[in-house]
Image: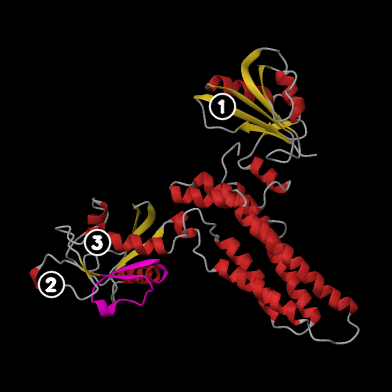
Amino acid sequence: MADTIFALSSGRPPAAISIIRVSGPQARAAGERMAGSLPEPRTAAVRELRHPVSGELLDVALVLRFDEPASSTGEDIVEFQCHGGRAVVDALLAALGELDGLRQAEPGEFTRRAFENGRIDLTEAEGLADLIEAETESQRKTAVALAEGGFRKHIAMWQERLLLLSARAEQAIDYDEEEEPVELSLLRECGALADELRQWLARPRVEPLKDGVRVVIAGPPNAGKSSLINAIVGEDRAIVTDVPGTTRDHIEVPLSLGGVPVRLTDTAGLRESGDRVEAIGVERASRLVEAADVLVWLGVAGAAPPHSRLITVHGKADLPERGGAPPGSVPVSSVTGQGIVELLRQVEDLARSILPDEGAIALNRRQALHLDEAAAALESAAVSNDHLFVAEELRMARSAFDRLTGRAGVEDVLDALFGRFCLGK
């Protein structure tokens, strides 16, 4: 039998109201010990909350009851909506802790029970974790789309189609007496489902929205990269000198451009160096350039590394000897501020191009990995002419979906995921 758990599920006191949640097989008994008779399921009622041993009045609160399986955790739940003072909350939590069979919940344990009892799948749990951590409106809307089961509904439809395909393949194995070619319509439907999954895999991912779009400023030494960073953020975050090779390691600055989360990164000047420390910085800068979502290049336009989202900057544009900016380059001066607004506009536009549409379902790395596994298995099935091989590939696709939803093979990610939740969630 599962433990009965309890925790403060609202913010830390003091507050006008605090919510204490109890979930598990002894939740109703614990509620009756504290509040006397409980209201009907999904109904609120005012009750006196008394200490289960001394009978001392602790608070007068609103009490709600949810019976399993129709509750958020899939278990019996009792909630106390009490006054939000620290003393009241501490007294109620202490009283619950004195009841046999009850214990304080661990971070994320209520949501984990909802997952284990089939109330949500792993994709919805990941959406809830993202929702708790959301700091921008775009992050919130994307997390809500996942947490409310938008992706789960698509997965359920794909799984249903996959089961029908598997049934047809297994039937062919059982009843075909002679070696006959695989039905063309079965192969076409496998390919069509694979194509649909590939379309989802081509969508913008959630990581740039969650972590910030990686905007890397790169170029040769003394090109003005650090000065540009300081001018953009309005303070001296990077050391600026006329000595080439001053920047030995990258400096990262979080920034919001029109609500778009950005990680602006200053890097060491790219050049051959005999200085061991500088050479390490140059090597790291090269790796950052390769991983950049947007590359801002300060240097000769033709010398810029190849990149799909490249902005070429004509730096130090206030100096007469610099001359005019080459076509396609943004003239920028960190001294006068010339061109910085235009540069940031271009950065924002490119950053938005790799973000998911607001409120759209966006996959994370784990989800994309398992969806790719399912697509690959379906693609292999679609080009096979052997019933046994088709059936096996379809079984592998079903296993990938089980890992995607958390029904199998994800024990290694569960502790890390639910550990992201706060106590009482």
Q: Name the residue under label 2.
A: 322
Q: Is residue 227 visible?
A: no
Bin the neighbour count of mark 3 within 10 Å (Cα to Cα): few under 14, some 14-19, many 20 and up. few
Location of the N terminus by quadrant is: top right
Q: On the image, which quarter does residue 248 sit in? A: bottom left
Classify mark 3: helix, strand or loop.
helix
Q: Mark 1 points at which residue?
A: 18
Q: Is residue 403 left or right of residue 178?
A: left
Q: Mark 3 points at which residue?
A: 342
Q: On the image, which quarter does residue 184 sit in? A: bottom right
Q: Do the residues labelled 1 and 2 touch (CB within 8 Å)?
A: no
Mark 3 vs mark 1, foreground winner is 3
Residue 95 numbered tag: none
Q: On the image, which quarter does residue 409 sit in? A: bottom right
- Magenta segment boundaries in residue numbering: 290-312
Mark 3–mark 1 Cα distance, whole angstroms, equals 48 Å
Q: Is residue 408 above or below residue 283?
A: above
Classify mark 1: helix, strand or loop.
strand
Q: Horizontal and vertical percent for residue 400?
A: 69, 65
Label 1 sits on what residue type? Ser
Residue at 15% in and 58% down = 335
